[in-house]
Each structure stands twice: as C-alpha cells, then as structure tokens.
C-alpha cells in the first residue's frame, strides 16, 4: 500500500510539471502503435547525437522523444531536423526535476503506454543477447510471449587505454573505437529490500574516483527497457521503477533471467570539459559530488585502464563473464 502511494505521488509530481517541457517539434501522429520508443533528456550533446541516433535506428527504435534542457551548442536545432525525433525544450532546473525524471515520467505517461520504451542517456548503448543478429523487435516479441515486462541492464563503463583526453572524439564516429576497455570484475551487488531491485556498484569509477569509499560510487543497475503502462513511474533515474514487479528481474531460485548491458561511453575527450561544466552548474545528485570527484581525478591526467582491463569484443564475451545473460532466449 505504501509503494502504491509512493508511485501515485511520483506520477502526480510528473503531471504537475508537464508545463515545464514545451513542445518544439512533435511527429507522433504517424508513429505506429507497435513502434519501440526511445526517451532521452540531454543538454549540450551535439557531438554525440549523430552516432547515438544511428546506433538505435539500426537496432530498430521507431521514434525518439527527447527533452532538451537549455542546450546552447546546437543540439536543439539538430534534433528539430530529424524526422524520427520529437523534441521538447525546458529551461527548468535539472536538479529540481529529480534529474530530469519528472520530465521523462510525464512523456512516458502521455505517450509511452502500450509501447516498449527504452530510456537512456546519450552516452549509453544497449547491448543484449543476439543484438548482433536480431533487432530489438525480436527481443521484445519474445519478452511479450514470455510475459516479461522489463529488461535489466548493468551500466558497464568503457574507457580508453591511455589518458581520457589523448584521442579527440569526432562527431559521428563510434565511441567504442576509442573507449573500448572495461572492468570484467570488481562489482558489489546487494538487494534493495524496499523496491526489490539489485543495487550494483564498482568498476573503474569506484576504484579510480571513489577508492576511499566505494559505497559512494554511482549505481550501475538500470532497467532501461519496459513495456510501459500509464501507472508506471521511474523512481530514481532508471535504477528502479514502480510497480515493484518491474524491478524483480532476477531469479531467486538460482536460475538465470535475461539481462543486457548499457555500454557507458562517458569517458571520451569531451568528458573533461563536460565534467568541469557540470561541477560548476551543481545540477546533479548530491550537489554534483560525482562530478567533483571526476574533476579532481582528471587534474592528474588519470587513466582508467589497468592490467585487469578487457577489450570489448561483443555480447558473447559479456555473457561468458557473467555480466549479461540470455536466460531462456536461445
């Protein structure tokens, strides 16, 4: 009963803030009822957008619903030109909107019901079993048939071998050509008793930026793909959702359920300037504590690569390492 009231509160909060997001270009009338939708909130990501959009177009995403939060680098103008993108603009506080989740919960409530909805950041790239040979529609069709309502995905930080700023990132190129290494282990997992989700921390950010207290490291558990209904909400980014059943994505009896990964290509040359900007803006969680740690670490030309790092080779490699699972989807 308490979680139902919590869900209604978050949903009401999103609806009350709907006027903060102003439609700039909407193209939703011709979107098929079975289209898979992608929801994003961003600020100043023009350099990333060409590859990001093409990556998910090739995967099978049918339409993008994007909230632009005061970009001044041309992101909004670029998005307006994309025929498979609907874009809203807001000058509201990212922090006061629960880091953009009020805005996205509103769009999910208004447009997502009945669709499979993927909610990601512009530096996150979904990988799932057989993604090299099967479009995302094949995955969602199987999940529908299996009565599975949500797909979990561990956020897997990828990074270059040298210093983060050594190789400039150029718009339109695959960021994994530069940030192609990851930590194969070094992860802590525990269960959140209230919401039922698994809480994952660790990886290069925990060891490099939060080594003194890894418990302060960012959460790596996400539930980015959901067969959305109007009474659903995200509670904390996409780390957990309500109703609670969306978070129960693991088998307590020892078996395996399907799970993907979000390759997190944050650590490109563009990140150095981005981290300084976001630290000064103070619009992120805990007064941008995470970005303060990044900025301090980057001053010393830090490299994230170490002798245990692995070069990313594909989803089968991640499955062998136990970082994703195909479950019963053969």
Image (cartoon, helix red, strand yellow):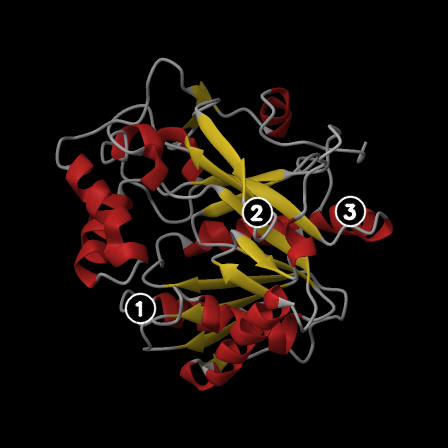
Residue at the (44%, 80%) spot, across then down: 21
- Residue 8 point in image, percent of width and height: 59, 75
SS class, disc 3: helix
Residue 216: give its label.
none
- Apparent side of residue 271 relative to residue 151 in the rendered image (left or right): left
Q: Establish if 53 lies above or below 293.
A: below
- Residue 184 point in image, percent of width and height: 48, 22
Farthest residue, direction left: 299
Q: Quadrant of the N terminus?
A: bottom right
* Nearest to the observer: residue 163 or residue 325: 325
* Nearest to the observer: residue 30 or residue 277: 277
Residue 138: give its label.
3
Give the foreground label among 1 and 2: 2
Which residue position holds label 1? 71
Q: Establish if 217 lies above or below 97.
A: above
How far apart, in angstroms, are the residues tagged by discs 1 and 3? 35 Å
Q: Establish if 201 lies above or below 10.
A: above
Q: Is residue 301 visible?
A: yes
Could you classify mark 2 by the number of other residues whose Cα lies within 10 Å: few (under 14), some (14-19), or many (20 or more)? few
Which residue position holds label 2? 193
Q: How many numbered circles are shown?
A: 3
Could you classify mark 1 by the number of other residues whose Cα lies within 10 Å: few (under 14), some (14-19), or many (20 or more)? some
Q: Quadrant of residue 210?
A: top left
| Nearer-N-terminus badge (2/3) | 3
How far apart, in angstroms, are the residues tagged by discs 2 and 3? 33 Å
* Nearest to the observer: residue 78 or residue 237: 237
| Nearer-N-terminus badge (1/2) | 1
- Residue 152 point in image, percent of width and height: 62, 44
Could you classify mark 3 by the number of other residues whose Cα lies within 10 Å: few (under 14), some (14-19), or many (20 or more)? some
- Apparent side of residue 206 relative to residue 193 in the rendered image (left or right): left
């Amino acid at each position: 009963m308490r979680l139902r009231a919590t869900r209604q509160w978050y949903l009401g909060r999103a609806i009350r803030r709907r006027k903060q997001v102003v439609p700039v270009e909407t193209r939703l009338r011709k979107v098929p009822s079975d289209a898979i939708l992608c929801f994003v909130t961003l600020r100043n990501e023009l350099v990333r957008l060409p590859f990001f959009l093409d990556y998910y177009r090739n995967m099978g995403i049918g339409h993008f619903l994007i909230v632009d939060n005061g970009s001044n680098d041309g992101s909004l103008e670029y998005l307006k030109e994309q025929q498979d993108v609907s874009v809203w603009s807001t000058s509201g506080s990212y922090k006061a909107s629960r880091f953009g989740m009020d805005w996205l919960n509103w769009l999910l409530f208004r447009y997502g019901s009945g669709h499979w909805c993927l909610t990601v950041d512009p530096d996150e790239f979904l990988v799932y079993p057989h993604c090299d040979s099967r479009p995302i529609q094949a995955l969602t069709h199987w999940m529908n048939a299996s009565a599975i309502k949500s797909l979990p995905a561990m956020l897997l930080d990828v990074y270059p071998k040298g210093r983060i700023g050594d190789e400039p990132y150029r718009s339109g190129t695959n960021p994994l050509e530069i940030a192609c290494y990851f930590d194969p282990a070094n992860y802590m997992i525990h269960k959140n008793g209230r919401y039922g989700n698994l809480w994952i921390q660790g990886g290069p950010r925990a060891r490099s930026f939060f080594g003194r207290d890894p418990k302060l490291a960012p959460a790596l558990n996400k539930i980015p793909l959901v067969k959305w209904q109007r009474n659903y909400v995200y509670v904390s980014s996409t780390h957990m959702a309500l109703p609670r059943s969306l978070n129960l994505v693991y088998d307590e009896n020892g078996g395996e359920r399907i799970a993907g990964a979000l390759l997190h290509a944050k650590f490109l040359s563009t990140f150095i300037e981005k981290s300084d900007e976001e630290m000064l803006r103070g619009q992120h969680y805990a007064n941008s504590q995470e970005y303060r740690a990044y900025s301090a670490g980057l001053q010393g030309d830090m490299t994230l690569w170490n002798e245990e790092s692995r070069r990313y080779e594909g989803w089968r490699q991640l499955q062998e390492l136990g970082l994703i699972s195909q479950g019963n989807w053969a």
